[in-house]
Image: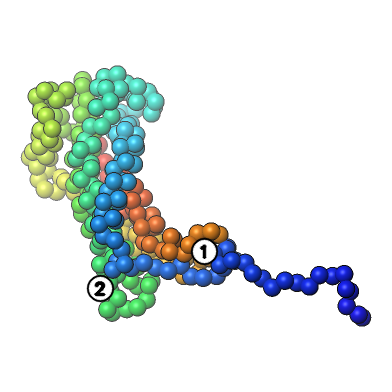
Amino acid sequence: MPEDPELPLQEPDRRSPGTMEDKRNIQIIEWEHLDKKKFYVFGVAMTMMIRVSVYPFTLIRTRLQVQKGKSLYHGTFDAFVKILRADGVAGLYRGFLVNTFTLISGQCYVTTYELTRKFVADYSQSNTVKSLVAGGSASLVAQSITVPIDVVSQHLMMQRKGEKMGRFHVRGNLEGQGLIAFGQTKDIIRQILRADGLRGFYRGYVASLLTYIPNSAVWWPFYHFYAAVAPVPSGVPSHCLSSHLWAPGCSHCLHPHQSHGCHQNPCAG
């Protein structure tokens, strides 16, 4: 049959690179390509902003988990109002200064991950092997730093006027006149040492390792697998998705190792 002259000829596909149909792989930015100064400065700053906003709810959650039945609070909103009335805004941030030291573990996590990948690369070029070993090692280092800080921080969260909630009670004035700055922290540390020794700072440590090491070790290989096969979204340059900082583990608030008190609660026993 003769060709229909009214049918338009098909134009060649001229879609710009970067559309969802573009099958380019995502470039992986390794440790040596990272601007360390910006990473550490902006990483800590972003994490601090997030921590300030969510910390009161972490404190409330911890108290609700520790209280006997509904002896003190009947729910999240009730706890928020009662703490605010009794202790003011400062009451919602008990243990906050100590808890900010966990920011160190966030930076140590990514640093350990990247340096371990670099070390393993001398023995294997497999992204799966490098990511699995590095992810597990990073969580081991991070949890070793995070757990003792969380233990002290959670005991400080339990400090309130009136009825004792946790195992330990700060001596002095909770309003800050008797014990200022890190005085309460020192008092809690002494009581933990006296009662449990150094092991008292690692309550729930094994549970944390069993939770976060497998999580981190499995997550990173899947991240690199995705980076190798996933198309780049429309309008997004591939390098914007390439850094390891975009994984759950970037700004500490999303780290696979981040516990935020999710390991065994030291105040409950």
Q: Nearer the viewer, mark 1 or mark 2?
A: 1
| Closer to the camera in the image, 233 or 182 | 233
Q: Which residue is mark 2?
A: 119
- Please tell me whether residue 205 is drawn above or below residue 163 in the rendered image: below
Q: Look at the numbered discs 1 and 2 and tell me whether their residues touch, using CB distance below 8 Å.
A: no
- Please tell me whether residue 188 is drawn above or below residue 199 in the rendered image: above
Circle 1: residue type:
Val
Q: Check the image and name the residue furthest to the right.
A: 1
| Closer to the camera in the image, 112 or 144 | 112
Figure quadrant of residue 31: bottom left
Q: Is residue 155 left or right of residue 21?
A: left
| Secondary structure of the residue carrying numbered label 1 | loop
Circle 2: residue type:
Phe
Residue 12 coordinates in the image, percent (x, y): 69, 73
Count the numbered circles shown: 2
- Please tell me whether residue 77 is drawn above or below residue 144 in the rendered image: above
Disc 1 crowd, CA 10 A, few/some/many (<14, 14-19, 20+): many
Q: Which residue is mark 1?
A: 232
Residue shown at the point (23%, 36%) measured from the top left: 96
Residue shown at the point (26%, 41%) measured from the top left: 265
Residue 16 coordinates in the image, percent (x, y): 59, 66
Residue 99 coordinates in the image, percent (x, y): 23, 41
Looking at marks 1 and 2 on the same chain, the residue that comes earlier in the sequence is marked by 2
- Please tell me whether residue 35 is drawn above or below residue 126 in the rendered image: above
Disc 2 crowd, CA 10 A, few/some/many (<14, 14-19, 20+): few
| Closer to the camera in the image, 5 or 169 | 5
Figure quadrant of residue 112: bottom left
Residue shown at the point (27%, 78%) measured from the top left: 122
Q: Is residue 239 left or right of residue 183?
A: right
Residue 155 coordinates in the image, percent (x, y): 20, 36
